[in-house]
Amino acid sequence: MPYMDAQTSPASGPDTDIEETETAETPRKARSLAPLRMVYREAAKYPTQVVFALLALLVTAGATLAIPAALQFIVDRGFGAESGAEGEIGQWFRLLLVIVFIIALGTAARFYFVSWIGERVVADIRRKVHRNLMRLSPSFYEENSPKEISSRMTSDTTIIETVVGTTVSVALRNIFLGIGGTIYLFWLLPGLTIWLAVGIPAVILPIVIFGRRIRSLSRDNQDRVADVGAMVTEVLGAMKIVQSFGQQDRESDRFGGAVERTFDTARKRIVLRSLMTSLIILAIFGSIVLILWRGAESVAAGDITGGTILSFVVGAMIVAGAFGALTEVYGELLRGAGAASRLAELLEAKPEIAAPARPEQLPDPARGSLSFRNVTFRYPARPETPALKDFTLEIEPGETVAIVGPSGAGKSTIFQLVERFYDPQLGTIRLDGVPLTKADPADIRDRLALVPQDGVLFSADARDNLRYGKWDASDEDIWEAARAANAEKFLSDLPDGLDTYLGEGGTQLSGGQQQRVAIARALLRDAPILLLDEATSALDAESEQLVQQALDALMTDRTTLVIAHRLATVRKADRIIVLEDGEIVEQGNHAELSVAGGLYARLAKLQFAANQAA
């Protein structure tokens, strides 16, 4: 931050308002600066830069405090009648220029080092928070919105960067100026300085009275801004739906209402802040005027020189400006403390699913057996409704088991438990005879390959999306997997082949193409257990047939779990498990279940009749 950002000239004061950009919610517990300790610990990892920043800070503060003394010499010795040498006035002005030069160099050094520290600390915090987020279980994201977490990772870290790279520097500089200037004034004119000190409580009183209310309104305003951001993200992400249903005007009105609520809260904060600032200005500069009045009378009486009173006035304004600036930076420090508190929550969050202290090793080579015994599971966000109830299922190595049933029956829950994203409240799940709770989750997931219902792709090129399942795969392996998933043709037709950027979420590809890339990714992983969650749901009939042939070959000698609503895709399964309300109501092969007259038969009849009618 340049030297002019706070109290550069003696005339600057507390009316130098630091504009607040409320972009993130400050937690309501952030009523002190204690959460900033986390930020200080990160900054302390770079002692060399911190020392240089402090040295530059001390130099600029000391040079600033030398200005009043230099002005005293200029007036009393340069302009005074006792000035004997013609060039003496130039000597003192040259001294003043040297001081200005030192201030300029010191400010440049201070700006560089504190800005470097701010950016470095923010980068380190972001990396630490992101690393911890990668460890957290899906249940954490059920209770904490990813949009809100994204706000913490961006807006809150920006606030911390401002605090570390600017606010702390300004606060320390003004503390040095305030204390050093007060000492100088007591040495220069102790009587007048005492009168100046009387005005300090008049400055502190408005801060105490208004400060808490302003902080509360600031938090409310940040809440409203966060709501606006979430609304924008939601609506823009669903723009096709908004326009399809002609809801543009309604969404604009809803957004306008949110913006107006934000403005109303901000207006209340601005009114209180304006009132507090005016009272502080009145107290500070009113005290200075009264002191100048008394000083002028002393000059007229011959008790002090004109240079002395000028030096005192300039010093008093530096001190007043320093204490006035502290009233501003304290609010900024509190905002930084709030941001640090929110980031600390993410940094300190512990994963509910973690490896045991001494994980049990899975058998090598892998067999691919899965066992569910009396498993009952409730999602943390819906504890009153069991997703699975007393669920028991034995899956043999190499077996293909299809899981069907109406929506909400618990099909996807089985996959999430197999991948150990959650642990059941009751019962045991085993992989190759080892309870999942005793194994390292990373080892478990190494033996699984998933094709999700929606082909989730990343904002990267085609190569990186394909090799996400096996990062060290060669291009030859990638093309082989793409060929097996019927993705080779459209991938080779891309402008830059595998180097083609696929856009955010793979928007450069159609839904069916995205799904085939996801299938190729799972093929490339070559894991002993394959999880297919509606793997062919986004494909046309021709592509589905080709991909199904590739999947049939892939499933050979592998354990495969298939979730399917389209029952035509599970006819060849060794066993079909029919779920309803989290319980197994039927199981058998397609032929057996079709003649049993149960839920599967009813679903099959409805689907096949609909297909024939189509």
Image (cartoon, rainbow, N blue to C red):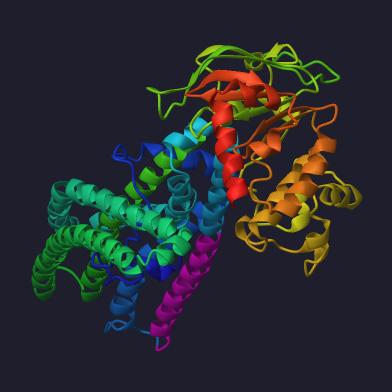
Residue at left offset 35%, top offset 41%: 33
Residue placed most toward the observer, 409 or 483: 409
Judge left or right: residue 48 versus residue 235.
right
Residue placed most toward the observer, 614 or 289: 614
The quarter of the picture where residue 576 lies is top right
Specify the principal SS of the magenta part.
helix
* As drawn, 74 above or below 34: below
**Residue 188 seen in render:** no
The quarter of the picture where residue 401 lies is top right
Residue at left offset 42%, top offset 84%: 90
Q: State which region is magenta.
A: 86-112
**Place of residue 244 in the rendered image (x, y in percent of width and height, measured from the top left):** 43, 65
Residue at left offset 50%, top offset 22%: 582
Residue placed most toward the observer, 402 or 321: 402
Residue at left offset 73%, top offset 25%: 443
Judge left or right: residue 399 versus residue 612.
right
**Place of residue 586 in the rendered image (x, y in percent of width and height, measured from the top left):** 59, 19
**Residue 399 seen in render:** yes
Judge left or right: residue 289 versus residue 409.
left
Residue placed most toward the observer, 143 or 608: 608
